[in-house]
Structure formats: structure tokens, C-alpha cells
Image: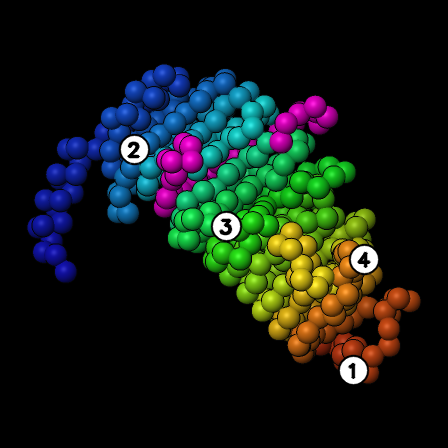
Amino acid sequence: MRPIHALFLFAAAFSTHAAETLVSDAKAFEEAAKAAKAGDVLILKNGEWKDARLKCRASGSADVPLTIKAETPGKVILTGDSRLQLGGRFILVDGLSFQNPTGTECIELRIDTDEVAHECRVTQCAVVNTLPADEKSKSARFVSIYGREHRVDHCRFEGKTTLGTLMVVWLNNEQKDWGRHRIDHNYFGARERLGKNGGEIIRLGDSETSMLNAKCVVEHNTFEKCNGEAECISNKSCGNLYRRNTFLEVSGTLTLRHGNGCTVEENAFLGNNAKGTGGVRIIGENHRVARNYFENLTGDKERSALCVMAGIPNTPLNGYAQVKDARIENNLFIDCKVPFAFAVMGDKTATLAPENTLVPNNRFNTAKPKDFPDHPGLLWDQKDLKKPAWVDQREEAGPSWK
């Protein structure tokens, strides 16, 4: 341990160099960002920032980040084609609010392909849209995550009507250290049905990078009426963990679309008998789905409470990989229309049944649906079925100022 007097000397030296700078427009922000260093705080003045393009290439350190924050959380309103782009390391973004964005990106954790951010945090921010859908609109995103070891937490995202996934984690076959992000304690609000592919809320990776180990953690988030398409979350990479998220009346599923070795545990899927509500869909190898709670889901086939897909022989990366070595255990299903669908064909060439899939200790409490076959031992003794305590002990998601 360093001597106490050394710590005081370090703090005193640091305090003489760190600075707080209040900026009132994009040009002032640009000038302040050029001179910013570890420990500095760039404060955005309260009010509307229209079409503000904010770029920050400066960096902090692991112990002393560079901070970009609102003068008052939630009172800095970025509108129109506003965008925040980060290109440094250890940058903390706090309390910004985007309203009715019209650009193709709101928060982008890179400047361009050569300037990518790492180890940054976006917290207590919001992107909210109240504009009607525009059929001519380009594909747009609320958040694009590049690089490695970012955190997005306690934010609010809702009302997206444009084409494109709301939040994307981008991977790179040439940059194997990308990933390892944490997305936690966020609120994802209503997204109306898009009517076509590309309406996901979160996508981790894509087909071309789906065999990379992203190792991201998505936990303690709330998804409510996120009905953009069949995949609320689209997993397209390996080694990700989805834990203790809550899905409220979501007409879609948490889909392990591409990639292997992911874990889905202790999530709650609460359908409230809303149309098309689903749970988890499994494709690929070595996935584990454990201790999840499924209640009053009305979806079937791909939107069943638990769906295991059939595979395509010699499938391309964007096809349906055969399910192998999956373990589905200790899940609880309450009054779901189709609790479990096995070997569902998403393509007419999908002829490979799941292989070595284990389904121990799952519990079902439901009137037996007509299309769910008899199976010895399928229905457990129902006297001890109850909602797990963790379902009602969720931490508050979204910014505290909302």
C-alpha cells in the first residue's frame, strides 16, 4: 500500500490539473474536447442542442476518467441530427437526453473505422422518439458499440420507429479483442411492429462475425412491449451471458440466432396473454438455458416459450446451425400456450434434429395444449410451483431523473 501522505500529494497534484468546463454549443465543445485530459469534466449547458455533432478524441485513465455530462441530468436535450461520437479511452458520458432523433446514429463509440473507443461508459442517458414512422427513412440506430469493454447502464431507450436495430454491438474479424461489454439496468420501452426484418432491440454481432467470442453481459434490463420483430434480442456471437432481464408483453424472443456457448439464466418472460409473446429460441451449439421463468406467453412455433430449432446441413453462417449439446434445465413455465417446441423448421432445408440436447428438471403448470404431445413425466407435481423470489426483486432500470 502507498503511504497515506503520498495519496494526499497525488490528490492535491491531480486537483490542480483537472478542470470543469461549461460549454454552450457544439463549437465550444469541440474546442474544449481538444484540450481535455484525464479528470477533466466537460459540462453541456442545459437547453436544446439542435443538430449538434459532438466528437471527443481525448482519453482519461482507468482511475480518472474524462467526463462528459449534462449541467442537469435530463435537461440537455439533443434534437434533430445530433450525434455523440467517442474515439478515446475511459470516457464517462452522463445524463444526456436525445429526443426525436432524425440522424442515422445517436451515440456511436467510434469516430470512424480508424478511431474506435475503448473502456468507456454511457450512463443515465436517454434516447426517446415520439415521431411517427417514416416509410422513406434510412436505417438508423440509437447506440452503436465498437471496441472493447464498454458499459451502457441505467439508460432509457424507447419509441424507435425507423428501420434498423436499436442497439448494436459490432465485432471485427481482424480485432479479436473487441467485445466484453456490459449492458445493464436499462429500460427499453415500446417499439411497434416493423413488419420486416431489422426491428431488433439489441443485436450482438452479425452473421460474418458470429463465430467470434464477444463475451458480453446483458443483465438486469427491462424490455417492455418491444414488438419490432420476432427477435427482441438477436445473439450473433459466442460466449455471451443474458441474466436477470425482464421481458414484459414482448411479441418476440431472446434468440440465440448465430454463435455458440451462450448462457440464458434467471430471466423473466411475462406475457400477460398479449398477442405473440415468446421466450427463448435456440440455434447453435453448447448453449445453456437455466432457471428462467415463463408466464402467460401466447406465442407458438418460433415464438413458443422455449423453442429449439432444426438445423440446415452444411449451413452457411447466415443459416440455421444444428443445435448440439444444449442444456435446458430448471426452468418454470406457467400457463404458456406452447411451453416447449422442438425441432422447429425455420427453413424447408432444415432437416437436422437437435443432437445431445438435455432437458432436465423443468416444470410446467398449464392446461395441456392440443398441439403439445403426451410425454411421461412431462408435468411435474404442481403443488410447489411458484414464482421465484428474484422475479420480484429487480433493481430499477433506466435513469433516476426520468
239, above or below 330, in the image = above
- Of badges 2 and 3, nearer the viewer stands 2
Left or right: 298 in relation to 65: right
Task: Pick the residue in front: 75 or 14.
Answer: 14
Q: Quadrant of residue 270?
A: bottom right
**Mark before the other along the chain sequence, 4 or 1:** 4
Distance from disc 4 to disc 1, alpha carbons, whole Å, reads 32 Å
Q: Amino acid at mark 1?
A: Gly
- Of badges 2 and 4, nearer the viewer stands 4
Q: Which element carries disc 2, helix, strand or loop?
A: loop
Q: Is residue 121 magenta?
A: yes
Left or right: 313 in relation to 174: right
**Mark before the other along the chain sequence, 2 or 3:** 2
Q: What range is drawn magenta here?
A: 111-139
Q: Amino acid at mark 4?
A: Lys
- Of badges 4 and 1, nearer the viewer stands 4
Q: Amino acid at mark 2?
A: Ala
Q: Amino acid at mark 3?
A: Asp
Could you tell me residue 105's position as x and y percent? Answer: 53, 30
Q: Disc 1 vs disc 2: Cβ atoms closer than 8 Å? A: no
Q: Which element carries disc 3, helix, strand or loop?
A: strand
Distance from disc 2 to disc 4, alpha carbons, whole Å, reads 52 Å
